[in-house]
Image (tube, rainbow, N blue to C red):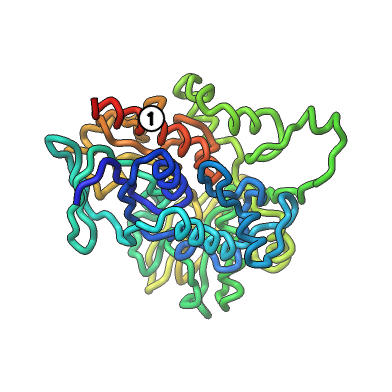
Amino acid sequence: METQVLIVGAGPYALSLAAHLHARGIEPCIVGRCMDAWIAHMPEAMVLKSEAFSSDLYAPGKGYTLADFCREHSLPYEPIGLPVPRSVFADYGRAFQQKFVPQLIEEHITHLERTATGFQATTESGRSILARHVVLAVGLHPFPKIPPVMAHLPPKLASHSFDYGDVSHFYGKRVMVWGAGASAINLAIDLKHHGAEVELVARAQRIVFHDPPVKQRPLLERIKNPRSPLGLGWRSWLAAELPLLFRALPLRLRHRVVARHLGPAPNWTTRAEFEGHIPAHLGMHVQSMTEKEAAVEVRCRQTTGAEHLLHFDHVIAATGFAPRADRLRFLSASLIQSLTTEFGSPHLDAHFQSSVAGLYMIGLAAANHFGPLFRFACGARFAARRLSAHLVRHARHNSH
């Protein structure tokens, strides 16, 4: 099978780009399991941190918004203030795919290598795809961040929060969730719902929950703190509206902003289910994790200097994601070696192209270049518009 553009992935970025390319006259080959991260890797009852108005997938023209989907299916919708359930967002993504990207091949790519004229990809079923351009829109899948202190533990004792959708098999087990952000709180609540004896351990001194949104604000407040898909404030507005300006910032500053802007902050809706219901060991620095009698002994030190020993049947790290090039393990060794990196993440030009000509990356992999907008689904609008226009220009140039 041959194609001009191969898109690897089938989440909001991949589907939005495929819809834009189709509208511009290019039929991409898109390979991935539709909305897999949202269906198979997130707690059943979680809600999105993003407000509904910033949780759309993007198609040209009239498009197909989350509001459209909710209206079609008689589901409640408010642009601000009514959290979007994970299941609704996943169903919306699938409906968007069926409407705009019916050609999706629901498999994973297991290998990608360069050829004399482009790239050759192999799927898990053995299908071979030749492509002139490849866009990696792989989302979170390759990038879970496992702290070194737990990396030596076997999977039966330690894992990452991204490994789970269903957590029912932890019924009756003592489980530690490590982290203080939305993933940690959502997972801890889901584990408790499924009968686990769950405790949270975090370096943070307190859990900083988002405040409930205010729908109507005075004019002066709207000027001082404009609303954007990333939240309130001019810094968030600039990051959401001017990703190319963000890319012009110095390298170290870009990485620092992406790491710190919009830090760990669970949704306000989870506060009542967490506080007073799930034990939380805060201000704890994990010193070591040791396997002992088919369990994990966790040695922690508080900021006061006091040491604690905790014991669990399993430890789950809700410690985020790191978009490192060396974690794209389906790339051939020569491709990985050819990628120029900055602090481990792939270097991208102003059109999302890596140092390997014809290989592009969007989504989380682009965050350290284009800003914190690309840690969220709402970054798909800018990526789809800009990259589809670039690929169309490239195709027209090659045809002459």
Position of residue 4 in the picture relative to residue 95 (left or right): left
Determine if residue 147 is in view.
Answer: no
> Can you say whether 173 is above or below 154 in the image?
below
Q: Give the residue drawn at x 43%, y 36%.
A: 366
Camera-side residue of 276 and 142: 142
> Can you say whether 76 is above or below 319 in the image?
below
Q: Position of residue 389 (x, y in %)?
A: 41, 31
Q: Callout 1: 10 Å neighbours few (<14), some, many (20+)?
A: few
Give the residue number, with chain letter if any, for mark 1: 390
Camera-side residue of 298 and 305: 298
Task: Say which element carries label 1.
Answer: helix
Q: Give the residue drawn at x 57%, y 51%.
A: 64
Q: Give the residue drawn at x 35%, y 61%.
A: 153
Residue flagged by tag 1: what amino acid is it? His
Camera-side residue of 398 and 50: 398
Q: Position of residue 58 (x, y in %)?
A: 53, 45
Determine if residue 339 is in view.
Answer: yes
> Can you say whether 313 is above or below 78 in the image?
below
Image quadrant in which the C terminus is located: top left
Residue at the limit of the structure toward the right, as seen here: 218
